[in-house]
Amino acid sequence: MAGDRYNHAKKVYADLGVDTDKALETLQKVKISMHCWQGDDVSGFEGAGELSGGIAATGNYPGKARTPEELMSDIDMAFSLIPGKHKLNLHAIYAVTNGEKVPRNKLQPVHFEKWVEFAKERGLGLDINPTLFAHEYASDTLTLSHPDKKIRDFWIEHCKAMRKVGEYFGKELGQPCLNNIWIPDGYKETPADRKGPRERLKESLDEIFSEKYSRDYLYDSVESKLFGIGVESYTVGSHEFYLSYASKNDVLCLLDSGHFHPTEVISDKLSSLLLFHDKIALHVTRGVRWDSDHVVTLDNELIEIAKEIVANHALDRVLIGLDFFDASINRIAAWVIGMRNMQKALLYALLMPLKEMKLLQEKGDFTRMLMMNEEFKTMPFSDVWDRFCEMNNVPVRNEWYKAVEEYEKNVLSKRQ
């Protein structure tokens, strides 16, 4: 029955000049970096307590991971329900130190050996992020731009340490690691000096990136933000700052879809960046009225992001990662929903007759272009998606949720 539906869908798309088999083959190669911090509300293993830096995980759904073993088990569960082979994105606070208190600026590859072992056994890649929040040296919302050199130096050392960890990941796993720097730096009220903190941030970044690593193992990126709670009036690491810095210093610019004004979308920015940058990075999330990091849904903006990546032949140039943390729902379900939706959006774009629609735009036939765009929305996309799930031996449609319910009953509910 499922095979009959796919064969029908294949013919329908073929009538538009679209090869569904080729689309599935292309999607199979796309790796999405799944963020570990959805599994424990960005708690990490330091026992640092409250989040800071203008971010918050809301909700108290039972069963969150408390140890490396629990988090790895939950990640395994999520990946078992997601088609394909992907990457796992870590923050520095997920170092496994076996009870030893290791300052963040002293972390070494040895503290991430368990993650490398985990990834090797499953054929995953790993990405890394230095953690510049939830720490006494970030309590006044300044880190790499802090006027106190002692504090700046601590964070510079921490970021350098994570680059070494990232290179270690790349060498051990045979695929490049993305090391992404995001900082919470800013002010609640309008500052008297906007330039000074940015000068210090530039100097800090210059020092962090002074050692060169092969891109066979490591990519570096910098991530901007419009504002955060407590830093509403001024953000040191603005989009303009990081876009300029990335362009001049051969690092990647990372766009987070929740880090811009609510009326601003990153889908419109991708084609511009791809003209001038060899590679760019994404954190895909869903902001509701502000950067609230909701679970990624298959909404218009997600589809537009995917369409821009596919239309610009940039699947090998855009490093896609997810970034949300919802503590109000089952955390494993959140991972699966977000990851599968990102894949669905990419498949939707791969199935579109984008070449023909581009020609219609160039001829000025906007009526036919609009018609095709709207009619495409009711094409038998779901049958092609079901085929992709079957190819990867994961449940189709909502059948995956049964496994999550069973896992919650047998595993999550027993965590007190």
Image (cartoon, rainbow, N blue to C red):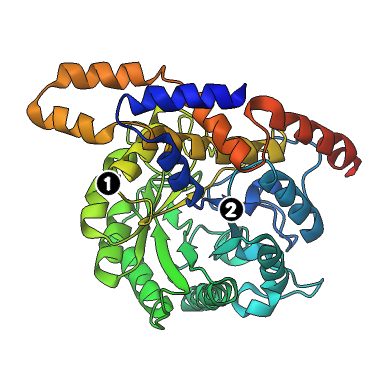
- SS at mark 2 in the image: loop
The residue lying at 31 percent from left, 69 percent from top is 199
**Does 341 sit above or below residue 245?**
above
Q: Which label number is shown at residue 312?
A: 1
Amino acid type shown at disc 2: Lys
**Does 33 sit above or below residue 213?**
above
Q: Is residue 402 visible?
A: yes
Q: Which label number is shown at residue 85?
A: 2
Q: Which of these two is toward me, 112 or 230?
A: 112
| Residue reaching furthest to the bottom | 211
Of the two numbered discs 2 and 1 on the same chain, state the one appearing first in sequence. Answer: 2
Q: Quadrant of residue 46?
A: bottom right
- SS at mark 1 in the image: loop
Residue 213 image position (x, y, % from top left): 42, 80
User: Relative to 362, is 278 on the left or the right?
Assistant: right
Identify the image quadrant of the C terminus: top right
Q: Which of these two is toward me, 292 or 308?
A: 308
Amino acid type shown at disc 1: Asn
Residue 204 image position (x, y, % from top left): 40, 74
Identify the image quadrant of the N terminus: top right
Residue 92 image position (x, y, % from top left): 61, 65
User: Relative to 411, is 251 on the left or the right?
Assistant: left
Q: Could you give the CA–CA distance between mark 2 and mark 1, rounded to whole angstroms?
A: 23 Å
Q: Are marks 2 and 1 in contact (CB under 8 Å)?
A: no
Q: Which of these two is toward me, 177 or 193?
A: 177
